[in-house]
Image (cartoon, rainbow, N blue to C red):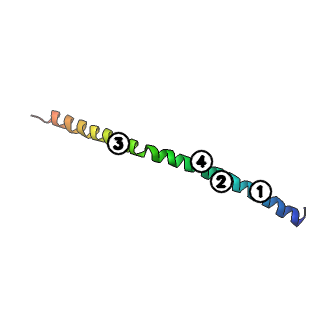
Amino acid sequence: MTLEERVAKLEVHSEQNTATLGDIDKKLTELSDQFLKHKGFIGGVIFTVSSLWAIVLVGIDYLLNRN
């Protein structure tokens, strides 16, 4: 295999990697957009659940120590 053949093979391989990286970047951008779209809703659900859990814990402690 000559030097020119090796260089040509590396160039083809580099172009394939560049195309693959472009596809991966596009998919990650789409995934990020989807996450950002639902971020506010997810935060609201987490806040609501944690607030309810705190109320339950305080309520149980209050009921057990009322005497």
Q: Earlier in the sequence, mark 4 or mark 2?
A: 2
The answer to the question of whether label 1 and label 3 lie on touching residues, with beta carbons closer than 8 A, is: no
For mark 2, does the 10 Å Cα neighbourhood hold few (<14), some (14 to 19), or many (20 or more) residues?
A: few
Rounded to the nearest angstrom, the CA distance separating label 2 from label 3 is 34 Å
Which amino acid is tagged 4? Lys
Tell me which residue sits at (23%, 38%) in the image: 55
Decide which of 43, 53 is in the foreground and name it: 43
Secondary-structure class at tag 2: helix
Q: Nearer the viewer, mark 4 or mark 1?
A: 4
Q: Nearer the viewer, mark 1 or mark 3?
A: 3
Q: Earlier in the sequence, mark 1 or mark 3?
A: 1
Rounded to the nearest angstrom, the CA distance separating label 1 from label 2 is 14 Å
Q: Nearer the viewer, mark 1 or mark 2?
A: 2
Establish if 42 lies above or below 9: above
**Label at residue 27:** 4
Viewport quadrant of the N terminus: bottom right
Establish if 19 lies above or below 2: above
**Label at residue 22:** 2
Q: In this view, does 49 lie to the left or right of 32?
A: left
Tell me which residue sits at (59%, 47%) in the image: 27
Q: Residue furthest left?
A: 67
Rounded to the nearest angstrom, the CA distance separating label 1 from label 3 is 47 Å
Q: Name the residue under label 3.
A: 44
Tell me which residue sits at (55%, 47%) in the image: 30
Quarter-wise, where is residue 48 in the image? top left
Quarter-wise, where is residue 38 in the image? top left
Rounded to the nearest angstrom, the CA distance separating label 4 from label 1 is 21 Å
Secondary-structure class at tag 1: helix
Which amino acid is tagged 2? Gly
For mark 1, does the 10 Å Cα neighbourhood hold few (<14), some (14 to 19), or many (20 or more) residues?
A: few
Q: Mark 1 points at which residue?
A: 13
